[in-house]
Image (spheres, rainbow, N blue to C red):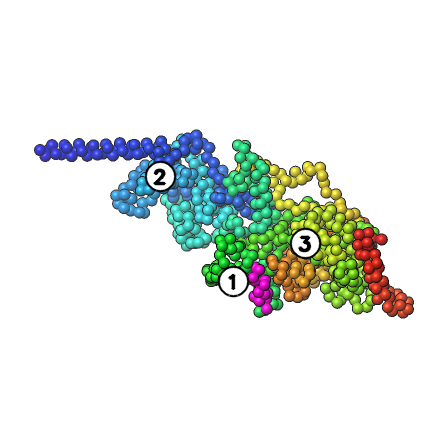
C-alpha cells in the first residue's frame, strides 16, 4: 500500500512538473510569437534607429547646445575608452564575452537568492545584452506578470541581438543608449554633461564614476549626491581589480582621487548663448520643413542627430555675457536707488493695472469667464516661487501680481557683435537672463535708436559734398511746419550761449549736438538720407520728419549692426547670419550656407564712396577719443583703434552704443522692457553710461587674451589722403571781429529770417530738395 501511494505521489508530482513545464512552454512561446506584444525580428534589429540629439557647434567646433527629446549622441567603438569598457564588464557582466545574450549561471543565482532566499541584494541577473534590449525596447505594464513577461521578452531579444551583432557592436549600442539622469542618454552625452569632454578623453576614475551611475542614475548622480557617487566609483574600481583589469596600486590611487566635475548641462533655458541658440532653433525648424530625408520624410531637429555649425565664438560670447552681467548688476542697483520708494513699478497704479491685465495669467482666467474680482483674488494668492535677482535667486512666497511687479523693475539689454566682412555673428546677447526674460532684444525688439542714427545723416551729407569742416550754429531753430518743434541739446555746453560761435560738423557728430544734426539733415535732404539708410539694409519704417536726425525711428539691434558694418566693409552693408553649415548624423553636408552665399550672383554693392567712408570713420574716432564716448579711453583704458557712436532717446528711455573696430562691429542697447519706465536722469540713462560699458568691458577682457589679437590689434587703414586732411580743422569758430562789432544781433536776425523762410515756402520744400 505504501509503495502504491508513493507511486501515486511520484506520478502526480511528475504530472504537475510536466504540466508546469508545458504551461511554461506555452507561456514562453506566447511571448516569443508576440501575443504579449511585438518582439522585434532579426531583420528589424539590423535596422536599429534611435533618436539622437541635434548638436550646435561654435565657429571652432565647440559644442554649445543641443536640441532633443532624449539627449543622446552616438559614437563609434574606437571612440570608447578601454577603461570604460573594462569598468562596465567588470561591474555589470563579467561573463559578457562568454555567453550568448543570457548568463544562465547568474540567472539561476538570482532565482535562488531572490525567490527562495528573499535576498534583495542579489542583483537583477541581466546581461549587458539584456540591458541593451531593455534600453531599445522599453518595458511595458503587463500587470502581475509584468516582470516575468518583460524578462523573457528581453532574453529573446538579447539572443537575437547576439545573432545579429558582434560583441563590440553590442557594447557600442549599449553605451550609446544607456540612460543617465536629466533625460541624458549614452556615455558621450554623459561625458559632456558631467566632465565637459568627449568620452574618449575620460580618465580611469571618471570612467569608473560614469559606469557606477548605471546602477541608479539619480541616486549616484555626482552633481546631486557627490559622496554617494565617489563610494560607488570606488566599488567599480574594486571590481576592475577583482577581474584583473587594473592592478592594486592603480585601484588605490584612483580611489583616493577627489571628485572633479566640470558640469555642463544642455538645458534649453540655461548655458551659453541661450538667445542665440533659440534663433538657431527657429531657423532649423523652418529649414526642416523644406528639406527631406531619403525616405521622403522631413528632418526632425529633435530626433535626427543633425550637426549645426554656427558663426558664434563661444569664448567671445562667454566674455560678453560676463561683461553684461557685471555691468547690468551695478546699473540695476543704481537704477533702483535713483527712484527709491517712488519707483513707478511700486506707485504707478495705471501702469501696474495695464501690466496685470495684459499678463498671460490674467488673459487665461478671463477666457475662462471669471470676473475681474475673481481673477484679482486668484492673482493675489501667494505661492512658492523662485524670483530672479542679480545677486542670488530667492525662493519666496509671492503672488502672481508680486512677481509681475518684481520683474517690471528690471532693466534689460541686447548686444550683437558681427564680423563686418560678411555679417557672421560672433556674440549675441538677447537679454539679461533667458530663463526669466524670453523676449529677444536683438532680433525681436525695435526701439528708438537716438543719436546712433546721426552717422547715417552725416554720411548722406558728406556723400553729397558737405565737408566735415563745414560750420553750423548750435543755436536752436523752431520749425513752424512741425507744430513749432524746437530740437534741444542734451546739455547747455552743447548749445553755446555765445551766438557767434559755430561748430564744425565733425565736432557736432563726436559731441552729439542735436541742433546741428537737424540742420545737417536739412542740408543733406531727408529723402536722400532715408534712401541711403534703406540701401544699408534697414527695412524698418523711417518717419519723414526732421526729428529723424535725432533717431526717433524704431530699429532693431540686428539692423543697426548690419548697416554700421559698412563703415569697415568698403561702404557695403551686411546681413548678420548665424549658421554656416548643417550636416546629418553621418557627417554628410546637407546645406552649406557660406558657400551658397558666395555663389549668389546678386552681390550687395557699396552704398557710398570709400572717401566718404574714411571721412566718417575719422569723425567717429573723434567720438571715442574726445567726444561722448571718451570714457572708453580715460575710464576703461582701451587704446585699440575704435570708432563709435553713443545714443540716448527721448525721456531717457533707451541707451545705445555702437563700437566699430576694423574687424568687429558691436551694437549694445539697454533699457526697460516696458517703455513707460525710463532712467530717472540723463546722467544715468545716456548711452555712454548705460550701454557703452558692456562693449568696453568685453573689449578690455579680449585685450588680455592673445586668441583675440586678430580683432584687438587690427588698425584702420586710410587710402584717401583728404579723409584725414578734411577733418583737420578747429572744432569751433567765431565770426570775425567786424561781424561782431557792427552786427551784434546777427545771430538773432539770421535765425529769425530762417524761421520766416520756413513759414513761407515750408520745411518740406527745402528738406526734400537735398543739399544746395
Q: CA distance from mark 1 to mark 3?
A: 31 Å
Magenta residues, start to end: 342-355
**How packed is label 1: few (under 14 Cα within 10 Å), some, or many (20 or more)?**
some
Along the line of sight, the residue nearer the viewer: 511 or 312: 511
User: Which badge, 1 or 3, is on the more N-terminal residue?
Assistant: 1
Foreground disc of the pair 2, 3: 3
**How packed is label 2: few (under 14 Cα within 10 Å), some, or many (20 or more)?**
many
Quadrant in the picture for residue 652: bottom right
Q: Residue at x 76, y 64 (%)?
A: 494
User: Which secondary structure is most common in the magenta stretch?
Assistant: helix
Check disc 2 and report its element: helix, strand or loop: helix
The residue sitting at the top extreme is 43
The circle drawn on residue 402 is: 1
Q: What is the x, y in percent for residue 361? A: 51, 56
The circle drawn on residue 554 is: 3
Q: Residue at x 61, y 43 (%)?
A: 579
Task: Tell me: residue 20, above or below residue 465.
Answer: above
Q: What is the x, y in percent for residue 684? A: 65, 64
Residue 747 visible in this rendered orientation of the protein: no
User: Which badge, 2 or 3, is on the more N-terminal residue?
Assistant: 2
Question: Residue beneath label 2, please?
Answer: 150
Check disc 1 and report its element: helix, strand or loop: helix
Amino acid at each position: 500500500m505504501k509503495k502504491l501511494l508513493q507511486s501515486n505521489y511520484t506520478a502526480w508530482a511528475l504530472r504537475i512538473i510536466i504540466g508546469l513545464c508545458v504551461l511554461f512552454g506555452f507561456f514562453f512561446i506566447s511571448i516569443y510569437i508576440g501575443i504579449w506584444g511585438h518582439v522585434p525580428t532579426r531583420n528589424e534589429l539590423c535596422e536599429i534607429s534611435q533618436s539622437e540629439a541635434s548638436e550646435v557647434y561654435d565657429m571652432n567646433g565647440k559644442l554649445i547646445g543641443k536640441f532633443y527629446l532624449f539627449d543622446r549622441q552616438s559614437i563609434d567603438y574606437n571612440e570608447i575608452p578601454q577603461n570604460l569598457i573594462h569598468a562596465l564588464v567588470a561591474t555589470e557582466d563579467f561573463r559578457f564575452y562568454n555567453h550568448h545574450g543570457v548568463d544562465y549561471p547568474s540567472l539561476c543565482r538570482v532565482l535562488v537568492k531572490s525567490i527562495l532566499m528573499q535576498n534583495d541584494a542579489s542583483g537583477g541577473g541581466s546581461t549587458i545584452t539584456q540591458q541593451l534590449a531593455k534600453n531599445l525596447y522599453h518595458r511595458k505594464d503587463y500587470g502581475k506578470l509584468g516582470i516575468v513577461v518583460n524578462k523573457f521578452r528581453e532574453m529573446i531579444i538579447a539572443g537575437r541581438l547576439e545573432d545579429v551583432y558582434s560583441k563590440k557592436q553590442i557594447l557600442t549600442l549599449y553605451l550609446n543608449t544607456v540612460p543617465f539622469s536629466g533625460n541624458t542618454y549614452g556615455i558621450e552625452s554623459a561625458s559632456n554633461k558631467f566632465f565637459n569632454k568627449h568620452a574618449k578623453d575620460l580618465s580611469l576614475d571618471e570612467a569608473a564614476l560614469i559606469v557606477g551611475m548605471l546602477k541608479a542614475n539619480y541616486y549616484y548622480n555626482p552633481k546631486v549626491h557627490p559622496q554617494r557617487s565617489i563610494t560607488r566609483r570606488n566599488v567599480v574600481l574594486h571590481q576592475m581589480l577583482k577581474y584583473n583589469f587594473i592592478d592594486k596600486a592603480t585601484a588605490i590611487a584612483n580611489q583616493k582621487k577627489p571628485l572633479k566635475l566640470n558640469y555642463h548641462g544642455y538645458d534649453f533655458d540655461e548655458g551659453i548663448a541661450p538667445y542665440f541658440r533659440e534663433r538657431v532653433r527657429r531657423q532649423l525648424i523652418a529649414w526642416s520643413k523644406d528639406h527631406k530625408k531619403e525616405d521622403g520624410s522631413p528632418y526632425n531637429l529633435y530626433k535626427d542627430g543633425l550637426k549645426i555649425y554656427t558663426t558664434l565664438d563661444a569664448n567671445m560670447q562667454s566674455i560678453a555675457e560676463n561683461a553684461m552681467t557685471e555691468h547690468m548688476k551695478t546699473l540695476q542697483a543704481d537704477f533702483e536707488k535713483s527712484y527709491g520708494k517712488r519707483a513707478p513699478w511700486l506707485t504707478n497704479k495705471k501702469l501696474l493695472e495695464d501690466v496685470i491685465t495684459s499678463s498671460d495669467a490674467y488673459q487665461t482666467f478671463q477666457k475662462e469667464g471669471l470676473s475681474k474680482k475673481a481673477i484679482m483674488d486668484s492673482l493675489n494668492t501667494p505661492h512658492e516661487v523662485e524670483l530672479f535677482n542679480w545677486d542670488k535667486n530667492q525662493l519666496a512666497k509671492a503672488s502672481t501680481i508680486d512677481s509681475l511687479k518684481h520683474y517690471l523693475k528690471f532693466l534689460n539689454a541686447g548686444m550683437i557683435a558681427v564680423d563686418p566682412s560678411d555679417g557672421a555673428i560672433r556674440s549675441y546677447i538677447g537679454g539679461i537672463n533667458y530663463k526669466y526674460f524670453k523676449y529677444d532684444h536683438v532680433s525681436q525688439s525695435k526701439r528708438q535708436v537716438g543719436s546712433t542714427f546721426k552717422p547715417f545723416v552725416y554720411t548722406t551729407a558728406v556723400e553729397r559734398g558737405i565737408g566735415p569742416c563745414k560750420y553750423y550754429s548750435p543755436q536752436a531753430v523752431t520749425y513752424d511746419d512741425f507744430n513749432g518743434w524746437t530740437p534741444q541739446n542734451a546739455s547747455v555746453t552743447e548749445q553755446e550761449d555765445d551766438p557767434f560761435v559755430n561748430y564744425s560738423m565733425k565736432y557736432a557728430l563726436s559731441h552729439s549736438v542735436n541742433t546741428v544734426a537737424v540742420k545737417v539733415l536739412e542740408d543733406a535732404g531727408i529723402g536722400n538720407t532715408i534712401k541711403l539708410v534703406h540701401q544699408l539694409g534697414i527695412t524698418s519704417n523711417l518717419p519723414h520728419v526732421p526729428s529723424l536726425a535725432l533717431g526717433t525711428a524704431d530699429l532693431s539691434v540686428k539692423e543697426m549692426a548690419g548697416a554700421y558694418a559698412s563703415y569697415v566693409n568698403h561702404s557695403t552693408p551686411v546681413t548678420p547670419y548665424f549658421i554656416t553649415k548643417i550636416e546629418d548624423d553621418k557627417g554628410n553636408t546637407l546645406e552649406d550656407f557660406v558657400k551658397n552665399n558666395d555663389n549668389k550672383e546678386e552681390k550687395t554693392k557699396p552704398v557710398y564712396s570709400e572717401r566718404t567712408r574714411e571721412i566718417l570713420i575719422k569723425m567717429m574716432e573723434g567720438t571715442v577719443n574726445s567726444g561722448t564716448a571718451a570714457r572708453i579711453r580715460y575710464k576703461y583704458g582701451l587704446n585699440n583703434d575704435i570708432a563709435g557712436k553713443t545714443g540716448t532717446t527721448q525721456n531717457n528711455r533707451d541707451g545705445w552704443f555702437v563700437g566699430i573696430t576694423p574687424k568687429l562691429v558691436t551694437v549694445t542697447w539697454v533699457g526697460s522692457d516696458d517703455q513707460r519706465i525710463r532712467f530717472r536722469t540723463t546722467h544715468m540713462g545716456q548711452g555712454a553710461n548705460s550701454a557703452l560699458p558692456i562693449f568696453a568691458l568685453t573689449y578690455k577682457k579680449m585685450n588680455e587674451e592673445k586668441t583675440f589679437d586678430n580683432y584687438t590689434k587690427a588698425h584702420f587703414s586710410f587710402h584717401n589722403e583728404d579723409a584725414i586732411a578734411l577733418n583737420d580743422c578747429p572744432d569751433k569758430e567765431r565770426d570775425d571781429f567786424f561781424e561782431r562789432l557792427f552786427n551784434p544781433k546777427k545771430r538773432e536776425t539770421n535765425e529769425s529770417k530762417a524761421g520766416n523762410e520756413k513759414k513761407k515756402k515750408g520745411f518740406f520744400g527745402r528738406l526734400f530738395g537735398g543739399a544746395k
